[in-house]
Amino acid sequence: MSKVLSQNFQLLLNPKQVRSEPYALKGRDGILNIEALRRARSEIVSWPGYRPTKLRSLKGLAATAGISSILYKDEGARFGLGSFKALGGAYAVASYLQGAVEARTGVRPSTADLAAGKLRDLTSSITVTCATDGNHGRSVAWGAQNFGCRCIIYVHAAVSQGRRDAIAAYGADVTIVAGTYDDAVRQAAEDAAANGWQVVSDTSYEGYTEVPRYVMQGYGIIMDEIVDQLPKGVFPTHVFVQGGVGGLAASICSYLWERFADKSPMLFVAEPEKARCLLLSAKAGRPTSDEGPLDTIMAGLACGEVSLLAWNILDEGADGFIAIEDEAAAETMRVLAEGRFGDEPIVAGESAVAGLAAMLLLAEEPETRPPVKLDSNSVVLVIGTEGATDPTVYSEIVGRPAETVVPGWASAQALEAV
């Protein structure tokens, strides 16, 4: 085993993990469940451009880390939007519009009917809104454009111009808010209440849970695809997944817990050291905010407050929480871009690599391998949640454009968007 990264990190094992008990206890199945996922998948697979994203094998990096294998689910090509968020925000927009049309007509349309423009006389007067670090807002804007309603997206001042432009390209109005992501969440909610708009957020809070449930349910397609794609006889022993507000991690956790019960892999949640609301919540035993400036390069994970729905699953479902430094993420991006250990080069954005970076850091330290049960037989699954969603930022970190890492990358993205 060789060291790939050498940064500091913080590991908190979860003493409350109870995945030996039935998933449905304590009403978890009322938040997310596989039956609802099947309904979401039946809609999403009908959308133009749908195809499962690739499950890649990083054999060289796995050997270097002293484990059996690393499976990397590459969400960078999802619907041409560049991230897994395409599954959540757009599905929530479609689901909300389906409900709105049904309330007016008594008939629930398919998302295909919405996308065909058959109901725009009903949907064009509806406005959806949300706050975003970039990727979720892009998905909501894309969903609004495809399914026929107006869209206003709130971003905080630290969101890059490239990400703002990508949102605006789908016809959304972009409003800039001073402060952090959480300030933008509050502003979007206040303005929505004042103007009669519908918030389509990827985080839930007191009194707002229905739409975020749709968002998280859409994310579940990722794990459903992975199970179909696993090589014969191979099943993960570990999953390392990004934190943020916790929506994706909760979706992955719930799927594995409900479907595989106590045979599900160990699940660890990775966060930036500068935005570790989930780790702090686990430490305190209740939802707890990170009150720092949240100034991390992992823009999609720059969240100071947990999603209450997500926490209801992760509180007793996750095996542990890891906080990593920005440079660990940056170096992991470069490792993937270079195919440093003989693997195929991968374009992975700043937030995409947090789970992989966390696993590598744990694997490098003899004292952390035993508690997290990483050994030469371990099969690790990570979710590469985004590609170069801001090509300028990606080039600055990696040292060269994504197009030179994977020739044809930009044109492939454009084709996925068709």
Image: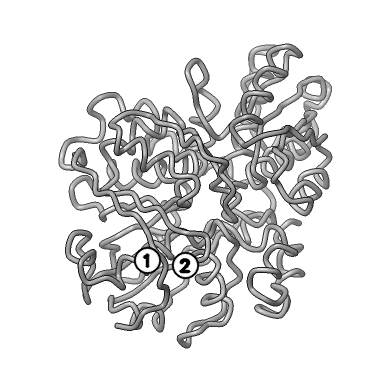
Between 120 and 258, the one lying in front of the other is 258
Q: Residue at x 73, y 32 (%)?
A: 177
Q: Are marks 2 and 1 in contact (CB under 8 Å)?
A: yes
Q: Position of residue 200 (x, y in %)?
A: 63, 29
Q: Residue at x 42, y 73 (%)?
A: 5
Which amino acid, mark 2? Leu
Q: Is residue 195 above or below residue 257?
A: above
Mark 1 residue element: loop
Q: Residue at x 58, y 77 (%)?
A: 337
Which amino acid, mark 1? Leu
Q: Would you say 196 lies left or right of 299 here?
A: right
Q: Position of residue 291 (x, y in %)?
A: 50, 35
Q: Which image quadrant: the C terminus?
A: bottom right
Q: Position of residue 201 (x, y in %)?
A: 59, 31
Q: Position of residue 147 (x, y in %)?
A: 74, 35
Between 278 and 91, the one lying in front of the other is 278
Mark 1: few/some/many CA within 10 Å (<14, 14-19, 20+): some
Mark 2: few/some/many CA within 10 Å (<14, 14-19, 20+): many
Q: Which residue is mark 2?
A: 55
Q: Would you say 214 lies left or right of 125 here?
A: left
Give the number of the disc on residue 230: 1
Q: Would you say 399 lies left or right of 165 here?
A: left
